Image (cartoon, helix red, strand yellow):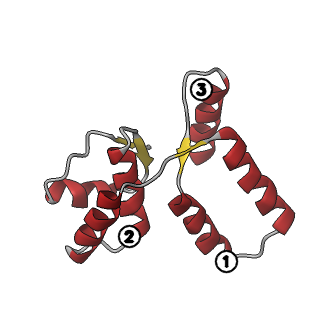
Amino acid sequence: MTDNILHRLWQLRKSGKLELFYTDFNIIEILWKLGKLEYDPLVVEKGLKSIEKNMSKAQPKPWSVLKALELKKRGFHDAIDLLLYLTAKDNGLLFLTYDVELTTFLSNMGEDVSNIIKAV
């Protein structure tokens, strides 16, 4: 399922129909996950270069960081997911996620989730 979505996203990007964005928070999350695994540094380097080459960088607004902190204090466990969602929202970007728990939490907190696309 994930591979199919990624393939479709890359096809849309290659055809110029989609622009993909990343943040420093995405890189931090990648490093956190890779730190738990065996990995080939050359493959990681290639992946990071590909991200930089093929995606645009979205910057968080100071408000995004403060709002993420507030929502974390209100009970959501993953600050990185909150930062990613809020950075996308504050930059007028769509946010693709598999995390139903995040979407449910944000809805329950009265947050606007209209920029969230749920991957299925």
Compared across the picture, whether 8 is left or right of 93 comes to right
Whole-Å distance between the Cαs marked 1 and 3? 31 Å
Q: Which mark is residue 17?
A: none
> In which quadrant of the rendered view does residue 61 lie?
bottom left
* Quadrant into which the N terminus falls: top right
Front position in the image: 28 or 3: 28
What amino acid is labelled 3 in the image?
A: Leu
What amino acid is labelled 2 in the image?
A: Ala
Q: Looking at the image, how many numbered discs can be counted on the residues?
A: 3
Q: Is residue 10 above or below residue 72?
A: above
Front position in the image: 21 or 59: 59
Query: Whole-percent x and y of residue 71?
Result: 24, 68
Which residue is pictured at 34% across the width and 74% down the height? 77
Q: Which residue in the structure is indicated by mark 1? A: 35
How busy is the neighbourhood of tag 3: few (under 14 within 10 Å), some, or many (20 plus)? Answer: some
Q: Which is more N-terminal, label 2 or label 1?
A: 1
Q: Nearer the viewer, mark 1 or mark 2?
A: 2
Query: Whole-percent x and y of residue 21?
Result: 54, 43
Q: Which residue in the structure is indicated by mark 2? A: 79
What amino acid is labelled 1 in the image?
A: Gly
How busy is the neighbourhood of tag 1: few (under 14 within 10 Å), some, or many (20 plus)? Answer: few
Front position in the image: 92 or 30: 92
> In which quadrant of the rendered view does residue 62 lie?
bottom left
> Mark 3 and 2 residues: CB-CB less than 8 Å, in contact?
no
Which residue is pictured at 55% across the width and 66% down the height? 29
SS for callout 2: helix
Q: Which mark is residue 12?
A: 3
